[in-house]
Image (cartoon, rainbow, N blue to C red):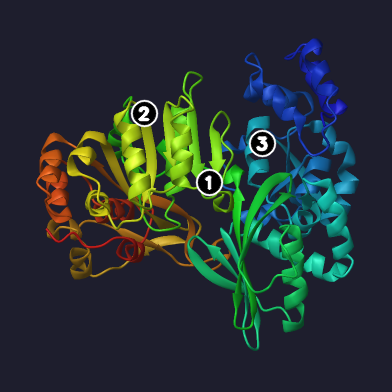
Amino acid sequence: MFRKEFATVIAKTGMIPAKDLRPLLQKKENQKITEFEVLDFDFFDDLKFAKQVAENYEMTFLDLSQARIEEPILTLIRKSDVLKYRCIPIQKTAKFVSLAVYDPSVVDIKDDLQILFQHPVEFILTNLSSWKSLFDRLKESFEEIVGSIKELKDDKDNQKDEEIKEKDIGEDVISYVNKILADAFIKKASDIHLEPYEKVFRVRFRIDGSLIEVEQPNKKLMLPMISRIKIMAQMDISEKRKPQDGRIKLFINESPIDYRVSSLPTLFGEKIVLRLLDSSNLQLDMTKLGFDLDQLKNFQEGIYQPYGMCLVTGPTGSGKTTTLYSALEDLNKIDSNISTVEDPVEFNLQGVNQCNIRKEVGLDFASALKSFLRQDPDIIMVGEIRDLEVGEIAIEAALTGHLVLSTLHTNDAASTITRLLNMGIEPFLVVGSLNVVVAQRLCRKICPYCKEEDSIPIGQLISCGISKSSAQKVKVFRGKGCKSCNSTGYQGRIAIYEVLNVSPRIKELILKNESSDEIKKQAIREGMKTLRMSALIKAVQGLTTLDEVVTNSSTDKF
């Protein structure tokens, strides 16, 4: 909501006409700071405005855009209170808590703020854009996030049945499940594992690719917790003998979150795994995925061809879907008809026709692909080429004027080609259709808050693939471990890539049925960076550790 007091402050400066402020004053969005919208006015000089206001109200002005504000200071206030009072703590001393404000009228509620902080306060006026940057860094408290959870139910008839079933599940169990979902959201987990054993029931989160135990609920809570999740996912709670799949849609802190739910009967009960699909975290900008400039250029050359096949390969959870989605986002123009078949669809892409695999009704990759070819497509994405039939249809589509994007499960880019040949696809068809092959892995990024130089023996650097001359000069880093990264030393992940362009010389090797090693050697001679090379570059840049390099890439034995 736009504060009337701030509108008065703006009016006194004369920098924004009253007619432009009226629409903003009429907005009643309690959970947003609509004052930020004045930054969109081309004629509004944010810095000049703040300095003028500071002079008018005799306040201390400080441009916080270059200031280093420690994270613990920002936790002194709940985000909901920032929305209410429009102030952010930036420093605490024995005498004062310094509060950054962009609206001088906040001074009028000084007494309320001193009660809130249980400490004397002083005000520092800053420009709105700097204040907004601080606001964006704020995190909701655990209680706020738990309280924000809202379940979305699509089918009204199903709702009635679920409400009846939920009577058997206590409020404490519902609250406990919500706390686990909120905790996973806060910690940016990709998966939640609920695992029953003979004597214990444990909850683990997969964070940045690694599983971490977070809870061991009382064994008595196992059945009600599993039942609660199955009800939310619209699964059959009476069926405990066979695996089931479901989906949960929630709003957590005003963010739509999808949970893909899978149940598996085990020796001591059903194991539940929830995959978090947060569309707000989906990175669709190819320049930010981890490609080197030459790798990005080669990949874009492949996907910008009017026809042909582009393949992305890597193990499960290596980010293949994100890479393909970023390519589709780049290719998604008003004059293109794009269709995808996935198992299942993870994120909704505006302007793209997405189709879910449904084996129970006979809709598999092969039948969906056949249907796509009758739908006048320009670009087709196939979730995975699993067998000869799907491979042949995909190649047929690529040879008949369509651009086909898909994935395979292989160790590197070169072995993808031999995998297609081993499926039974003729070499001349591979040569005629294949544009580019991308292999990828995800490496954990070093936590920026506890990053420090790591002392690695030169011999170990050389064994990892760094030349002897470079090993004496390069610096590598590690994360010491802090509160921000849960003492792991890592925060977030970055992709490493291997981009193989199917050049004329490589086409010759394919036609001769040469091994993947020979194809890889030729690609390296033509300038391809292997996964190990890409990982080492990231390590030298200080983005990841040498341990992650060794874990996620194999040595180049050439």
Report the residue marked by disc 3.
132
Residue situated in front as seen by the camera: 462 or 407: 407
Q: What amino acid does circle 1 point to?
A: Leu
Q: Give the secondary structure at mark 2.
A: loop
* Residue 471: % across, % down: 19, 60
Earlier-in-chain disc, 2 versus 1: 1
Earlier-in-chain disc, 3 versus 2: 3
The answer to whether the residues at label 2 and label 1 have Cβ atoms under 8 Å apart is no
Q: Nearer the viewer, mark 3 or mark 2?
A: 2
Q: Nearer the viewer, mark 1 or mark 3?
A: 1
Report the residue marked by disc 2.
402
- Above/below status of 269 relative to 139: below
User: CA–CA distance between discs 3 and 2?
Assistant: 45 Å
* Residue 385: % across, % down: 38, 48
User: CA–CA distance between discs 1 and 3?
Assistant: 48 Å
The answer to whether the residues at label 1 and label 3 have Cβ atoms under 8 Å apart is no
Q: Residues within 10 Å of mark 1 (few under 14, many from 20)?
A: some
Q: What amino acid does circle 3 point to?
A: Lys
Mark yes or no: residue 285 visible. Answer: no
- Above/below status of 239 relative to 93: below
Q: Nearer the viewer, mark 2 or mark 1?
A: 1
Q: Residue at x 44, y 37 (%)?
A: 370
Earlier-in-chain disc, 1 versus 3: 3
The answer to whether the residues at label 3 and label 2 have Cβ atoms under 8 Å apart is no
Q: Is residue 76 left or right of residue 520?
A: right
Q: Which mark is residue 363?
A: 1
Mark yes or no: residue 85 visible. Answer: yes
Residue situated in front as seen by the camera: 77 or 19: 19
